[in-house]
């Protein structure tokens, strides 16, 4: 595994958002929600298939972001294994995954006494910039002559 794929995988181990509501903190990871006190883990599949009925749409930004992130990770891993990868796709998926966490945090910010800090956005954008900047630059600004 290259440093690039390892770095992308490491982003999935960081908390993507830190949600504070009524003085209680919840850590939102790619794999699930962690309430530290008392410790409680709600896995992403449980959240999506058991707890999403009737929830506001901004809360669905988190699972969507995880899907985009998994796509970026798969793109990078398959590219590493086969030597064929479109870095624009990997970069775009990382950036879109980061934007979902901004939407997630913005949804919390609209409610009194609740907010979320989109830590994952910084990590996803930083990894896209660090490893995929040439592809992003070519897509956004055109080829450099």
Image (tube, helix red, strand yellow):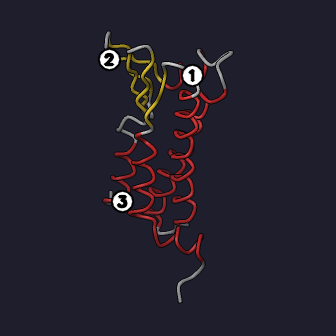
Q: Residues within 10 Å of mark 3 (few under 14, many from 20)?
A: some
* Element assignment for label 3: helix
Q: Determine whether, in the image, residue 107 is placed left or right of residue 21.
A: right
Q: Which residue is mark 3?
A: 4
What separation in Å lies between label 1 and label 3 (alpha carbons)? Answer: 38 Å
Say above or below: 103 vs 96: above
Residue 101's x, y, as percent?
Answer: 52, 39
Residue 111: mark in rendering: 1
Residue 13's x, y, as percent?
Answer: 35, 38
Say above or below: 135 vs 54: below
Q: Residues within 10 Å of mark 1 (few under 14, many from 20)?
A: few
* Element assignment for label 1: loop
Q: Which residue is mark 2?
A: 36
Mark 1 near mark 3, Cβ–Cβ under 8 Å? no
Residue 45's x, y, as percent?
Answer: 53, 24
What separation in Å lies between label 2 and label 1 (alpha carbons)? Answer: 22 Å
The image quadrant where one finds the N terminus is bottom left
Question: Residue at point 53% right, 40% down?
Answer: 102
Mark 2 vs mark 1, foreground winner is 1
Mark 2 near mark 1, Cβ–Cβ under 8 Å? no
Outermost residue, top side? 38
Report which quarter residue 60 is drawn in.
Answer: top right
Report which quarter residue 58 is drawn in.
Answer: top right
Residue 21's x, y, as percent?
Answer: 45, 18
Question: Residue at point 38% right, 34% down?
Answer: 15
Q: Residues within 10 Å of mark 2 (few under 14, many from 20)?
A: few
């Amino acid at each position: 595994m290259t440093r690039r794929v390892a770095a992308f995988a490491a982003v999935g181990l960081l908390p993507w958002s830190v949600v504070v509501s009524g003085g209680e903190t919840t850590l939102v990871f790619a794999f699930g929600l962690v309430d530290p006190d008392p410790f409680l883990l709600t896995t992403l599949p449980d959240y999506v298939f058991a707890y999403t009925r009737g929830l506001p749409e901004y809360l669905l930004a988190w699972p969507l972001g995880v899907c985009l992130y998994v796509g970026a990770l798969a793109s990078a891993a398959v590219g590493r294994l086969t030597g064929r990868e479109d870095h624009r796709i990997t970069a775009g998926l990382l950036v879109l995954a980061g934007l979902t966490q901004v939407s997630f945090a913005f949804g919390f910010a609209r409610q009194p006494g609740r907010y979320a800090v989109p830590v994952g956005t910084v990590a996803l954008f930083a990894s896209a910039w660090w490893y995929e900047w040439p592809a992003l630059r070519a897509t956004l600004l055109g080829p450099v002559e």
